[in-house]
């Protein structure tokens, strides 16, 4: 087990290095000079040159890359070109919206998908099953930002239960959670549809196994068999999907934040693009990719804990 | 998967197709959208760019079947032209991803267990760690928004999907006897990959391509919605939704029509994919 974790850890670090190089190089080739952009059209060439030096844009490529990466490791993401404050501060403010939103949505999607998927599997081929599968088929086809708009139309504009957007801050946690509820529901719906389908098919596969028949034969009730034997084994593929979904949720949050005017990482990235604040774009993208790679790593480790056979398997 | 199934004749495939409601409904919906997109090149009910402000935000009527938008433009005409954008972006992106991704996967499988295999698959994992939207954001930051960049973003994101699928399918085939026979007869790895392996994983690839095409339509809509896709005045379903957002309480139809259009199209393509899977692999039909 330790060697397995070590191996995964090495691959985690290598992926992060590779990702940082890709992100850095992509944003290196961006046309336009940030210094020129910050100072506007009337800036003298001398002032622009001075600012370039101050921003550290003059050094050789390799040096700038290492300055950026070493900074990241220390939590120093550089100074935003437009806000003129440390990027780490901008991110710290906004991550407390994006991360809770993604977790909230993941929790909702799991809470909806598990019972629904299990029900469909247990009542296989019944009207319930067909209904659930039909509903998830539609859920897969609904764009989450459009669903978000419909939620706003119904719950904010018509019923006035929720505000249509904005974020009140975490001073009052209940109010904050309320503000994140519609966005989380919008994000969770398509994910719940996928998860319910995976849950159903995975459980159906497990229910066909011999040990399930043995469990029933030794006198366990259907519920006991389901709970003690089938579900545990069916969870492995479900876990993969949950891990994958986290990255979709983080990326999806970028769009949903725009629907609800939530000041999260997504809005920060878009502002960064429009104002050519590339250091912000670079850092936020790196952070999101880091999150995705980290979650993949954690899923791999969890796997090995759940299923010892996978520890030895080389990929 | 499909390689193990008994070889199906063309007739039995057709019969299976006619017996699969998923396939029939999915194919019909997809066909309607493709035809509407093609028709829009030669005819739309109105000029999709024609503004008619006094006639703005009109609900569906006999003159404007799907109503008019905030500039008084005919929504049906915009939906038809938008279908072009959606289908073109998703189709080109998935095709390019297949043409690049599948050979990478086949190559990795042919050199399985070597450093090359490892490097190719790690590179795949790396691309996969960038959600499509992040790729689009990076590309837009560099080249600016547009349809071509949306295609690149969706395509890049899809590449590892096909590489992985092709590699996984090929790996199991390399152990089979008919591949052994081909190797004994002196065929090289590249030739075996394309002559024997590719035809045997083709069905699986087509089913996946259909699913990815549906996801591509959703991705294109999302990119257009946040302004990273095609630029106005070219209509796109995602852009129409973005424009409708502030008017949703005044004129719900401007938000409902493009949204329902996307749902219907994606639903149709997904059903088509399910149907194809049923047809190609009858064993799955009984299990699921």
Image (cartoon, rainbow, N blue to C red):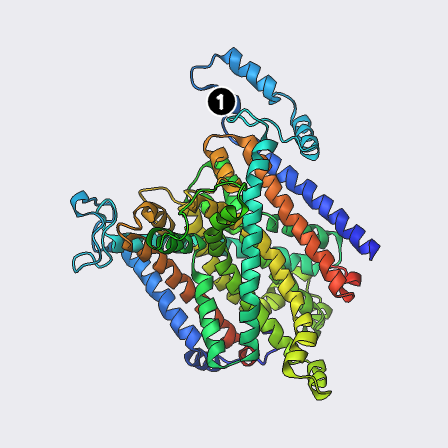
Where A154 falls versus A64 (above or below)? below
User: What is the total number of numbered labels drawn onto the structure image?
Assistant: 1
Where B16 falls versus B119 (above or below)? below
Where B181 falls versus A66 (above or below)? below
- For the residue pair B254 and A21, the one nearer the viewer reads as B254
Left or right, residue B216 beside residue B190: left
Left or right, residue A159 beside residue B218: left
Give the residue at x 61% y 59%.
A242
Query: Residue B136: x, y in percent?
Result: 50, 44
Q: Tag 1: Cα neighbours inside 10 Å, few (<14), some, or many (≥20)?
A: some
Query: Residue A96: x, y in percent?
Result: 57, 42
Q: Is residue A222 visible?
A: yes
Q: Quadrant of residue A306?
A: bottom right
Task: Give the quarter of the figure containing the N terminus of chain A.
Answer: bottom right
* Residue pointed to by mark 1: A38
Left or right, residue A180 beside residue B260: right
Q: Is residue B102 visible?
A: no
Give the residue at x 70% y 35%.
A73
- For the residue pair B16 and A258, the one nearer the viewer reads as A258
Q: Chain of mark 1?
A: A
Query: Residue B117: x, y in percent?
Result: 71, 55
Residue sticking out furthest to the right: A2
Q: Secondary structure at mark 1?
A: helix
Task: Give the quarter of the figure containing the C terminus of chain A.
Answer: bottom right
Q: Quadrant of residue A150?
A: bottom left
């Amino acid at each position: 087990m330790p060697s397995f974790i070590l191996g995964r850890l090495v691959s985690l670090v290598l992926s992060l290095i590779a990702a940082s190089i890709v992100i850095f190089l992509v944003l290196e080739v961006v046309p336009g000079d940030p210094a020129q952009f910050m100072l506007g059209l009337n800036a003298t060439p001398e002032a622009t040159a001075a600012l370039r030096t101050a921003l550290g844009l003059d050094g050789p490529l390799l040096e700038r890359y290492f300055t950026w990466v070493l900074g990241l490791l220390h939590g120093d993401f550089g100074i935003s070109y437009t806000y003129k404050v440390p990027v780490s501060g901008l991110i710290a403010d906004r991550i407390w919206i994006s991360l809770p939103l993604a977790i909230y949505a993941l929790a909702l999607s799991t809470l909806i998908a598990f019972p629904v998927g299990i029900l469909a599997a247990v009542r296989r081929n019944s009207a319930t099953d067909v209904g659930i599968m039909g509903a998830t088929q539609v859920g897969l086809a609904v764009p989450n930002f459009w669903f978000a708009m419909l939620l706003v139309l119904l719950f904010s504009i018509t019923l006035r239960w929720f505000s249509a957007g904005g974020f009140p801050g975490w001073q009052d946690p209940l109010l904050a959670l309320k503000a994140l509820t519609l966005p989380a529901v919008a994000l969770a719906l398509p994910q719940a549809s996928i998860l319910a389908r995976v849950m159903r098919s995975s459980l159906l596969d497990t229910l066909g196994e011999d040990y399930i028949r043995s469990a029933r034969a030794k006198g366990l009730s259907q519920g006991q068999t389901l709970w003690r034997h089938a579900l545990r084994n069916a969870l492995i593929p479900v876990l993969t999907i949950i891990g994958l979904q986290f990255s979709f949720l983080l990326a999806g949050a970028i769009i949903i934040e725009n629907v609800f005017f939530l000041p999260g990482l997504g809005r920060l990235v878009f502002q960064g693009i429009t104002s050519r604040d590339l250091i912000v774009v670079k850092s936020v993208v790196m952070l999101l990719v880091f999150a995705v790679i980290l979650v993949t790593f954690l899923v791999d480790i969890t796997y090995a804990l759940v299923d010892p056979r996978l520890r030895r398997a080389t990929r | 998967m499909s390689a193990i199934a008994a070889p199906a004749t063309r007739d039995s495939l057709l019969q299976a197709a006619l017996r699969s409601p998923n396939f029939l409904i999915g194919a019909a919906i997809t066909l309607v959208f493709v035809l509407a997109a093609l028709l829009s090149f030669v005819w739309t009910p109105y000029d999709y760019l024609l503004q008619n402000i006094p006639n703005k935000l009109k609900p569906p009527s006999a003159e404007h079947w799907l109503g008019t938008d905030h500039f008084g433009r005919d929504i049906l005409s915009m939906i038809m032209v938008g279908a072009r954008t959606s289908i073109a972006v998703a189709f080109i992106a998935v095709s390019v991803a297949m043409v690049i991704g599948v050979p990478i996967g086949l190559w990795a499988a042919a050199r399985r267990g070597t450093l090359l295999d490892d490097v190719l698959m790690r590179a795949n994992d790396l691309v996969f760690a960038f959600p499509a939207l992040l790729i689009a954001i990076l590309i837009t930051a560099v080249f600016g928004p547009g349809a071509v960049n949306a295609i690149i973003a969706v395509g890049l994101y899809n590449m590892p999907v096909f590489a992985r699928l092709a590699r996984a399918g090929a790996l199991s085939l390399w152990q089979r006897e008919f591949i052994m026979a081909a190797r004994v007869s002196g065929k090289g790895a590249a030739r075996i990959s394309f002559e024997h392996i590719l035809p045997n994983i083709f069905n699986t690839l087509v089913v996946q391509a259909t699913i990815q095409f549906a996801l591509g339509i959703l991705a294109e809509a999302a990119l257009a919605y946040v302004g990273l896709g095609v630029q106005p005045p070219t209509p796109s379903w995602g852009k129409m939704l973005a424009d409708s957002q502030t008017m949703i309480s005044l004129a719900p139809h401007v938000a409902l029509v493009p949204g329902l259009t996307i749902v219907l199209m994606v639903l149709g393509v997904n059903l088509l994919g399910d149907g194809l899977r049923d047809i190609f692999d009858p064993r799955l039909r009984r299990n699921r």
